Image (cartoon, helix red, strand yellow):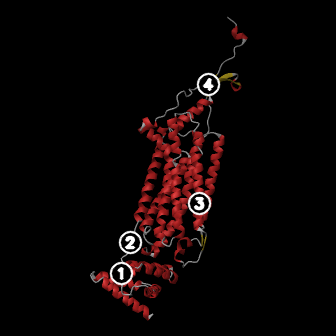
């Protein structure tokens, strides 16, 4: 203990020399910092400095000797608790005037800006649900309304996380703030895992409003069921990732015994399955779009619009890179930044893609030359075939051709309109009276 006190005195002397040209207040603050250095940290300095070519009084040498700093770091990790290690790192970094890293602005800007953009697209979608546009508010809109509510909470949490220190080195963040960041992340993760499948369910419900074919509808219902299973399974796994539950945000300091699942494996599994569901949702309508009786230009526009989900998949791939750091980090408030903003971007881009068909309807009014409705030349006009109606006493009826019904649906889809869930054949009822022999008599 006496040797440690001597070492502290030597370092104090070195610090005093370094701050000789500074203000008295600055000197007092740095002396107080030395008093905050844990005993285990001082012990590591005492053991490792003599092994280098630096002396205890040569602070510049101690600060710039990379090999010495690596040895001290290993010693501190083995000898100190996590809290003591962080305190040691903070004190030594401050004494050595190490640069202070801060990218918390990235966290808040990515979250808030992305959230605002998603809300704008959602509101544009809701404009097209006004009576003047002829498209009713459907189940797909209801699901997306719930999703946008969750996305707003996610954007707000981005600001909260940044204000508590996400984006800074962990040793510069107060311990209580670290706990609060992990608590918000715990809620954030559950919201994220809910938004992803719900966004796809909204898109799939939109498909059901447009495409009436039985085989396509069955396939769509199956994909909806897969997304529901994803939602239930991964949200439950996330909620109960640790026992007790609060260990999810308390165990970071190693002082709270807990049994937790492999969070990294859970993250990779959810990301892989989500990417698979993204691709299935994206390619599902392409075959039906290929059947549309519209110009090639308009058909390509629709296919590009529906395949913009590829960008969501690309964002998911970029997010996978951040999962590597997520699994192996010892500096979570710094390394969690990429995972956070890529997750937020992925959510916001998904919502925007879900709103594109409706937004296209609005753009058609602003840029008619680009988005105007153009059906393929030679498209069918209404034609009718004649049948006998036994229910009307032998009356005649004319049924509109099914080919014209499909053409009408194609034009509506091209214009961004949603079609009814069930196609109803239009009939024109014409009643005729039978002529009896008595009626033929001339008076």
Q: Which residue is mark 2?
A: 100
Q: Say which label, 2 or 3, has the lower sequence index.
A: 2
Q: Say which of marks 4 and 2 sits in front.
A: 2
**Residue 25, position in %: x, y?**
29, 81
- SS at mark 3 in the image: helix
Query: Callout 2 environment at 10 Å: few (<14), some (14 to 19), or many (20+)?
Result: few
Residue neighbourhood size for the residue with mark 1, other residues' Cα within 10 Å, grouped as few (<14), some (14–19), many (≥20): some
- The answer, for residue 195, to whether it is visible in the render is yes
Identify the mark nearer the N-term, 1 or 2.
Answer: 1
* Mark 1 or 4: the one toward you: 1
Does 100 sit above or below residue 388?
below
Label 2 sits on a secondary structure element that is: loop
Residue appearing at x 53%, y 31% in the figure:
376
Q: Viewer-nearest of labels 1 and 2?
A: 1
Mark 1 lies on residue: 60
> In the shown orientation, is residue 360 left or right of residue 283?
left
Query: To which residue does mark 4 refer?
Result: 384
């Amino acid at each position: 203990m006496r040797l440690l006190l001597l070492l502290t005195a030597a370092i104090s002397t070195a610090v005093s020399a370094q701050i000789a040209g500074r203000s008295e207040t600055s000197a007092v603050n740095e002396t107080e910092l030395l008093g905050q250095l844990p005993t285990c940290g001082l012990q590591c300095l005492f053991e490792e400095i003599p092994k280098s070519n630096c002396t205890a009084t040569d602070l510049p040498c101690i600060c710039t000797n990379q090999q010495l700093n690596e040895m001290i770091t290993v010693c501190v990790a083995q000898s100190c608790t996590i809290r003591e290690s962080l305190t040691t790192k903070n004190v030594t970094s401050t004494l050595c005037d190490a640069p202070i890293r801060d990218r918390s602005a990235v966290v808040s800007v990515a979250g808030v800006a992305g959230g605002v953009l998603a809300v704008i697209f959602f509101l544009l979608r809701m404009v097209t649900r006004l009576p003047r546009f002829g498209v009713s508010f459907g189940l797909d809109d209801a699901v997306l309304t719930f999703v946008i509510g969750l996305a707003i909470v996610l954007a707000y949490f981005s600001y909260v996380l940044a204000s508590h220190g996400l984006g800074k080195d962990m040793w510069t963040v107060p311990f209580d703030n670290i706990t609060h960041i992990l608590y918000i992340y715990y809620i954030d993760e559950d919201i994220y895992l809910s938004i992803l499948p719900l966004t796809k369910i909204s898109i799939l419900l939109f498909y059901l409003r447009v495409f009436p074919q039985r085989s396509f509808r069955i396939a769509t219902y199956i994909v909806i069921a897969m997304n529901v299973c994803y939602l239930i399974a991964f949200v439950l796994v996330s909620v109960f990732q640790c026992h007790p539950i609060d260990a999810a945000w308390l165990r970071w300091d190693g002082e709270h015994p807990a049994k937790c699942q492999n969070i990294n494996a859970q993250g990779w599994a959810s990301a892989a399955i989500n990417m698979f569901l993204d691709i299935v949702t994206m390619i599902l309508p392409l075959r039906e779009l290929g059947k549309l009786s519209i110009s090639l230009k308009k058909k390509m526009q629709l296919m590009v619009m529906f395949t913009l989900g590829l960008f969501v998949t690309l964002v998911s791939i970029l997010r996978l890179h951040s999962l590597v750091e997520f699994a192996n980090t010892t500096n979570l408030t710094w390394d969690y930044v990429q995972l956070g903003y890529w997750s937020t971007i992925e959510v916001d881009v998904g919502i925007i893609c879900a709103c594109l068909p409706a937004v296209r309807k609005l753009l058609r009014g602003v840029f008619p030359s680009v988005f105007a409705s153009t059906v393929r030349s030679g498209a069918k006009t209404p034609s009718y075939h004649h049948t006998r109606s036994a229910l009307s006493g032998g009356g005649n009826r004319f049924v509109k051709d099914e080919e014209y019904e499909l053409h009408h649906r194609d034009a509506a889809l091209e214009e961004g309109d949603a079609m009814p869930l069930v196609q109803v054949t239009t009939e024109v009822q014409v009643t005729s009276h039978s002529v009896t022999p008595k009626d033929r008599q001339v008076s």
